[in-house]
Image: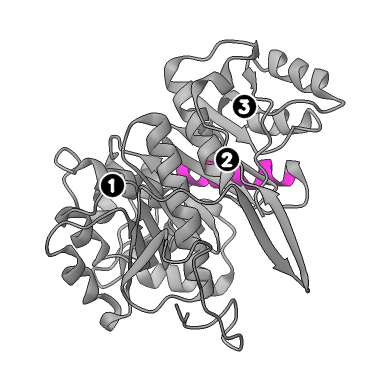
């Protein structure tokens, strides 16, 4: 398969199956690039793992080979329903999973690559035609949906079909600077048994489900990585940082933004009717962050039909105290208690991490101090 180009436009690229004739995915529409293929292959594995572990439809929104958000089917809240002008009581399971995944970090999901664990139905195909999205991978498509999606982006929208029966080789290989590296594929099944070693606190079923989803998410997120989850959806993902606590802080900041977007002052922002959805999202986030430049302040004022309501630092802090029951998963061992201290600031009540750090006792002590349940999985999930 000839690809549009490699990681950069100046690099030619193509793809071939490891086993001749056995393709994990096939292209139904469009011409993928190297990064499109990486997004498709990683995101498909994520939603497949998540759906099999949690027995619900799953979706992911990928950007640059890491998820911006992921979720399983569940309730769509009023904020998301208003943003996408849908009836939250009538939305289907698969569409709900994608909307919840995309809402985790809607600024980053602009121009995403979508993945869903179940065949695309008419409802989801219609939604995708109305958002800025570059492609989708799914195990099938309802009649007429490929034709609907093929019209998007003047025919350049990527539609890819995954083979649910495909089993990859047990050995993986990668060429780097003339050296071919081999490793055994990680075949560990994700299940709640990984959460059996609870060293402090207790895990209700809802928290276990969130932690299990987090394990699936981080398995396909560039390391180091940490994610926050609640209600079967990610709230913030910190990926690819050199410092574990930076992952925790980055994901925590995104989680705060997700929660603050639900503040009455943010929901009261009245935009001019011609302001597009993505611009509304971006202005809501900048309003939440509160550090607008003079130019941004001028442009935001012109985007509103009436002055923005007040949202003071004190109001932000007060609102954030209402966020609780959040789960945190780390792909590697938490090396210091500072990760727990920062997590506590963002409503975290449950943590899953491999354990095995020389300061694991200090991490456990911090969890007890903050009344956070801690599960040690014994499973590192680095991904590069």
N-term mark: 2 or 3? 2
Q: Which residue is mark 3?
A: 352
Determine contact: label 1, label 3, CB under 8 Å. no
Crowd tier of the residue under label 1, counting other residues whose Cα lies within 10 Å: few below 14, some 14–19, many 20 or above: many
* Quadrant of the rendered image containing residue 193: top right
The colour scheme applied to this rendered structure is: one colour
Q: Is residue 261 visible?
A: no
* Quadrant of the rendered image containing residue 357: top right
Question: Going 66% across and 59% down the picture, which residue do you hit?
Answer: 173
Q: Secondary structure at mark 3?
A: strand
- Magenta residue check for 328: no
- Magenta residue check for 253: yes
Q: Which region is colored magenta?
A: 246-260
Query: Distance of mark 1 from mark 3, alpha carbons?
Result: 28 Å
Q: Is residue 357 visible?
A: yes
Question: Going 47% across and 66% down the picture, which residue do you hit?
Answer: 20
Q: Which residue is mark 2?
A: 227
N-term mark: 1 or 3? 1
Query: Distance of mark 2 from mark 3, alpha carbons?
Result: 10 Å
Q: Nearer the viewer, residue 118 or 164?
A: 164
Of all residues, the one furthest to the right in this rendering is 358
Q: Which residue is mark 1?
A: 118
Above or below, comparing residue 183 to residue 128 in the picture = above
Disc number lying in front (2 or 3)? 3
Crowd tier of the residue under label 2, counting other residues whose Cα lies within 10 Å: few below 14, some 14–19, many 20 or above: many
Crowd tier of the residue under label 3, counting other residues whose Cα lies within 10 Å: few below 14, some 14–19, many 20 or above: many
């Amino acid at each position: 398969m000839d690809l549009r180009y490699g990681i950069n436009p100046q690099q030619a690229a193509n793809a071939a199956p490891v086993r001749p004739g056995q393709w994990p995915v096939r292209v139904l529409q469009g011409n993928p690039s190297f990064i499109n293929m990486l997004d498709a292959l990683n995101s498909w594995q994520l939603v497949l793992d998540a759906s099999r572990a949690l027995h619900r439809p799953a979706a992911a929104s990928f950007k640059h080979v890491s998820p911006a958000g992921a979720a399983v089917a569940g309730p769509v809240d009023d904020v998301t329903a208003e943003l996408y002008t849908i009836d939250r009581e009538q939305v289907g399971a698969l569409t709900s999973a994608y909307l919840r995944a995309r809402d985790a970090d809607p600024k980053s999901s602009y121009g995403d690559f979508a993945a869903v664990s179940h065949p695309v139905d008419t409802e989801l195909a219609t939604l995708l035609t109305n958002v800025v999205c570059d492609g989708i991978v799914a195990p099938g498509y309802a009649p007429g949906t490929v034709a609907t999606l093929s019209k998007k982006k003047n025919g350049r929208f990527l539609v890819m079909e995954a083979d649910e029966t495909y089993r990859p080789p047990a050995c993986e290989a990668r060429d780097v600077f003339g050296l071919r590296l081999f490793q055994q594929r990680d075949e560990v099944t994700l299940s709640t048994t990984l959460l059996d070693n609870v060293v402090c606190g207790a895990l209700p079923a809802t928290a276990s489900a969130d932690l299990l989803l987090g394990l699936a998410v981080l398995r396909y997120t560039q390391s180091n990585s940490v994610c926050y989850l609640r209600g079967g959806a990610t709230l913030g993902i910190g990926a690819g940082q050199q410092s574990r606590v930076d992952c925790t802080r980055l994901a925590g900041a995104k989680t705060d933004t997700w929660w603050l977007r639900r503040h009455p002052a943010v929901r009261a922002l009245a935009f001019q009717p011609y302001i597009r959805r993505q611009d509304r999202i971006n202005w809501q986030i900048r309003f939440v962050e509160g550090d607008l430049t003079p130019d941004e302040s001028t442009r935001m004022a012109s985007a509103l039909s009436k002055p923005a309501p007040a949202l003071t630092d004190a109001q932000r802090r007060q609102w954030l105290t209402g966020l609780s029951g959040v789960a945190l998963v780390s792909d590697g061992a938490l090396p210091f208690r500072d990760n727990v201290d920062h997590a506590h600031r963002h409503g975290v009540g449950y943590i899953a991490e491999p354990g095995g750090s020389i300061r694991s006792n200090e991490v456990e002590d911090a969890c007890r101090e903050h009344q956070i349940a801690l599960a040690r999985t014994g499973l590192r999930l680095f991904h590069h």
